[in-house]
Amino acid sequence: MFGYFKPDERFYSSIIRWHRERYGVGDLKEANISYQHSVLGALSSAVEAFTVKGKGVLVQTPGYAKFREIIEMRGRRVVKNPLIWDGATYRLDFEDMERKIVEEKIRLAVFCSPHNPTGRVWTREELETYAEICLRHGVLMVSDEIWADFSRGEGHIPLHSVSEEAKNRTISFYSPTKTFNLAGLVISYGVVYDAELMRRFQAQSNLSHYNNCNALSMEASIAAYSQGGEWVDALNCHIGKNTEYVYRFIQEKMPGVRTWKAEGTYLMWLDFSGLGLTADEVVSRCCSDAGVLLNDGRTCIDDGDCCMRMNVAAPESYVREGMERLRAAFF
């Protein structure tokens, strides 16, 4: 049956169960779930629904390139809140964030949790502080949590779960596509607790017709969330080992290159700026000399000069060969 249809109870119950068992969220209901084709499509609808043209939208940098693309294509401005490198990890700059919110009269902030491209998994204290600042200034929080299932260690904490006030001022986006490599099937969903926010968000989504469910996508999502938990645990163990290997390799064999053991996602953020090369030279050595196709950090929103984004969701042998090729190209 491949005609028009609406998601059935199995779709919603699989999401509710996954969020309860994986994220510790016990109050999610069908009425709080909005089917969407993709997280980026949902983000585009949210930007259009809750901001006006010409206004700023707050984003942490370095940030996912598509955030900038969507915000600017919708006629809004990206207001950058750079992360702080403290010598060991990346931290949120709350002082700069609050100043930008006030100066730019921000009404919507796009948050990425876990963070792409740095791989930070935000602590509960960080999430609480972020939410407190936004709530204090009447800022709606749009949280891209597509990487939630790649939060290693203590696990994922949804932004909307840190307080009752945050729950009613947050729109969170999730998808099984990143976790289970289903992006080609195109499916995601929003979690919205406040009824009025849901009404406005759903109305904007309806205008684009970007929220009509696909039968194959729905069945894939149900199967993944109902039967894929053990596989996700094994996957995270594998990615964690690859992350540890890359970190140790760089520490021991690639002096001057900076990285850290990413706590989430399957990405690693490699900073080659300490080698005295230009960004073009870094890209050339990685891609042309080493034959290792990493993402140019300049495609991210700022703070990506001489940085490369590496995907370690690959067989261990590929990762090891890639690192040896990079070492030979730079040293």
Image (cartoon, rainbow, N blue to C red):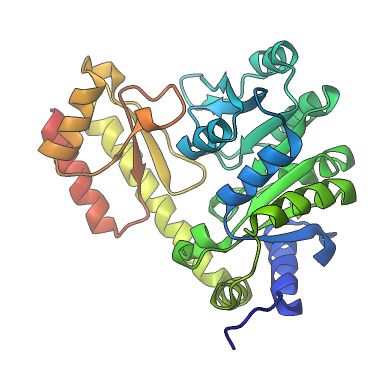
Estimate the x, y position of residue 165 in percent, counting from the top left: 88, 38
Above/below status of 6 relative to 102: below
> Going by the image, does 313 lie left or right of 201?
left
Looking at the image, can residue 314 be seen? yes
Looking at the image, can residue 117 be seen? no
| Residue at the spot 81% in from the left edge and 51% down from the top edge | 198
Estimate the x, y position of residue 242 in percent, counting from the top left: 35, 50
> Going by the image, does 239 lie left or right of 83?
left
Residue in the foreground of this view, choosing between 228 and 73: 73
Q: Quadrant of the C terminus?
A: top left
| Residue at the spot 72% in from the left edge and 32% down from the top edge | 51
> Going by the image, does 154 lie left or right of 181?
right
Q: Residue pushed farthest front?
A: 207
Q: Residue pushed farthest bottom?
A: 1
Residue in the foreground of this view, choosing between 136 and 140: 140
| Residue at the spot 57% in from the left edge and 21% down from the top edge | 80
